[in-house]
Image: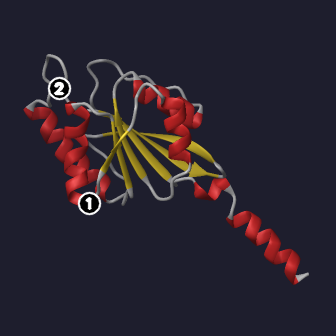
C-alpha cells in the first residue's frame, strides 16, 4: 500500500505539466524609431522601464527576446532589475520555441513582435490574439490552471498583477 502511494506521488510529481511555468508573460517591443533594426524612441524607453517595474513583482526566472534592438531594449530594464541574462530566441521557429517554453520551471517573460507574439500565444495556449502595428501597450499573461494556460490581458500602462 505504501509503495503504491509513493509510486503515484512519483508519477504526479514527475508529470510534464508540473514542469510548466505557472506564468508566461508575452508582449511586443515598445515604441520604436524608423529604419532597419530601429532602436526604441524616448516613449518606448520609458514604457520599457515601466514594464520592468510592473513585471519584476512576478519574479520571472527566465527572460527571452528576439535578436533585434527594439526587443532587446524593451527587456533590458527588467533584466537589469532582476540581474538575469536574456536568452535570444528565433522568431522564425515559434513551434520549437513554444515547446522549449513549456519545459521551463518558474515564470518567464517573452518580448517579441506584433506578428510573432500572437502566433506564440496560439502555439502555447490555443488562444487567438491580435496586436495592431500601432499598439504597444498589450501584455498577455498565460497562467497555468488545471494543466492548461488561461489567457489574461493586461495594459502595460496600468498593470496590476
Residue 47 x %, y %? 18, 39
Left or right: residue 66 compared with residue 99 = left
Residue 83 x %, y %? 24, 60
Q: Nearer the viewer, residue 46 or 98?
A: 98
Q: CA distance from mark 2 to mark 1?
A: 24 Å
* Residue farthest toward the left in the current orientation of the protein: 42
**Helix, strand or loop status at disc 1:** helix
Mark 1 closeness class: few <14, some 14–19, many ≥20 residues within 10 Å = some
- Residue occupying the point 17% across, 47% down: 49
Residue 30 seen in render: no
Residue 107 x %, y %? 44, 55
* Residue farthest toward the right in the current orientation of the protein: 1
- Residue occupying the point 48% across, 28% down: 93
Left or right: residue 62 compared with residue 32 = right
- Residue under circle 1? 82
Say if 104 sits above or below 42 in the image.
below
- Residue under circle 2? 32
Amino acid at each position: 500500500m505504501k509503495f503504491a502511494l509513493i509510486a503515484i506521488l512519483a508519477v504526479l510529481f514527475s508529470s510534464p505539466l508540473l514542469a510548466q511555468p505557472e506564468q508566461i508573460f508575452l508582449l511586443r517591443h515598445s515604441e520604436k524609431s524608423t529604419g532597419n533594426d530601429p532602436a526604441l524612441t524616448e516613449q518606448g524607453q520609458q514604457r520599457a522601464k515601466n514594464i520592468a517595474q510592473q513585471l519584476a513583482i512576478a519574479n520571472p526566472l527566465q527572460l527571452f527576446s528576439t535578436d533585434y534592438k527594439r526587443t532587446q531594449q524593451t527587456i533590458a530594464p527588467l533584466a537589469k532589475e532582476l540581474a538575469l541574462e536574456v536568452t535570444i530566441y528565433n522568431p522564425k521557429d515559434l513551434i520549437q520555441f513554444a515547446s522549449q517554453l513549456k519545459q521551463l520551471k518558474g515564470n518567464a517573460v517573452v518580448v517579441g513582435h506584433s506578428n510573432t507574439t500572437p502566433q506564440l500565444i496560439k502555439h502555447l495556449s490555443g488562444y487567438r490574439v491580435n496586436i495592431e502595428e500601432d499598439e504597444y501597450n498589450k501584455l498577455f499573461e498565460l497562467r497555468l490552471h488545471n494543466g492548461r494556460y488561461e489567457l489574461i490581458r493586461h495594459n502595460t500602462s496600468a498593470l496590476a498583477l
